[in-house]
Image (tube, grey):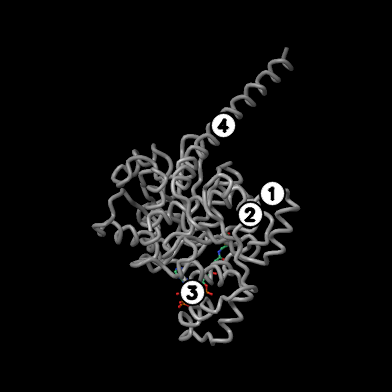
Amino acid sequence: AAMTSGAARRRLDMNEYRERLEARLGKSREMMRVVLNKAKSNPKRVALSEGTNEKMIRAAYQMQDEGIAEPILVGNTKTILRKAEELGLDFDPTIANPRDGDWDHYADRLHELRKRKGLTKSEAAETIRRDTNYFASVMVEMGDADAMLTGLTHHYPTGLRPPLQVIGTAENVNYVAGVYMLTFKNRVVFCADTTVNLDPDEEILAEITKHTAEVARRFNVEPRAALLSYSNFGSVRNEGTAKPRNAVKVLQDDPEVDFPVDGEMQADTALVEDILEGTYDFADLETPANVLIFPNLEAGNIGYKLLQRLGGAEAIGPMLVGMDKPVHVLQRGDEVKDIVNLAATAVVDAQTE
Ligand code: ACO
């Protein structure tokens, strides 16, 4: 009987687990569905700078097939067509081949943008022919594409540098940042910065917080931001804890900030209602935060990966925020669905340009 009840209990656990899993997937699917539908209502041109990569080709097929975006595969035409055929994908992709055709105007534009940063005319021509990240960046900068995706086959900084140099930040933005949306059962959090700024000061932290709050709103989530640290509201006072503490002052004094924000605080303070209502009932947050701003890149990158792998969150990102045009730099291991999801968020961004 003990065996049976144990097995029954395990079955119950399994059922409960499945239910939770479904609720969680349901939530992230629901959030993504909003974005996918919005993308489909007005699909935009997305340059995929790693056009010969099989995952990119599959993703391009799916985007085109489902009407999410109009993909432009950047790379060697023959290679792309051969791979598409090998993958059994029946489509006629739009391809931009940097080594074939007349792209002198791209080289000229790149030279114009970078000539006072040490780039010569012949180097610009060579870069356009050889480096598809620069090619795609110029393509977007010149308006021949509306957005860009890269990152599958490079180190993250290698994919990020060309768009930073060519496209740059939006007006009134100094620092871009990488945001992850993590969905759990009945809860969603937006984490930043997870990918770009190594050691942000208070001004940068404040800027990142505003960008991240905007991302939350794009997913129909009303932001409540916490600046995280290992101390609570001055419980440890040193240079490190001062940055998020001062960032909160910057934000609370900013008339543009129309969402609750507080800190510095520990992660559990930010997430547990009892702590916010108890010890820290003076905090500007009444309910747990859903925008989590990490004090530096180590904390941000490690933090979101722990949540994703141990906490079982569904992750969408990294969404690069603050660029003048939508650009996303993927991670090496990302899957086709990650590419399509980020392409959809880029399309939705491009719609409001
Ligand atoms: N926001 C906006 N623009 C920036 C930023 C920023 N945070 N940082 C640099 N730039 C601009 C610069 O102003 C410069 O423009 P300019 O050339 O027109 O003057 C251009 O980008 C290049 O900047 P550099 O200083 O020459 O380039 P750097 O080598 O410092 O690279 C980079 C910048 C790539 C963002 C760098 O800070 C970096 O490597 N960050 C960490 C990335 C990383 O390793 N992430 C973790 C892994 S990612 C993951 O797990 C998915």
Q: Which mark is residue 165?
A: 3
Please name the amino acid that badge 3 sits on: Gln
User: Percent position (x, y) of residue 310?
Assistant: 60, 44
Q: CA distance from mark 2 to mark 1?
A: 9 Å
Residue 299 in sight from this viewpoint: no
User: Percent position (x, y) of residue 121?
Assistant: 54, 86
User: Percent position (x, y) of residue 352?
Assistant: 38, 55
Please name the amino acid that badge 4 sits on: Glu
Q: Which mark is residue 89?
A: 1
Question: Please, is residue 272 above or below residue 71 in the view?
Answer: above
- Secondary element type, mark 2: loop
Q: CA distance from mark 3 to mark 2?
A: 32 Å
At x 56%, y 31%, the residue is 22
Q: Quadrant of the C terminus?
A: bottom left
Q: How many marks?
A: 4
Which mark is in front, 3 or 2? Answer: 2
Which mark is in front, 1 or 4? Answer: 1
Q: Which mark is residue 22?
A: 4
Which mark is in front, 3 or 1? Answer: 1
Residue in front for this viewpoint, 12 or 268? 12
Q: Residues within 10 Å of mark 3 (few under 14, many from 20)?
A: some
Residue 106 in sight from this viewpoint: yes
Q: CA distance from mark 1 to mark 4?
A: 31 Å
Please name the amino acid that badge 1 sits on: Leu
Question: Please, is residue 278 above or below residue 16 in the view?
Answer: below
Labels 3 and 2: the sequence-earlier one = 2
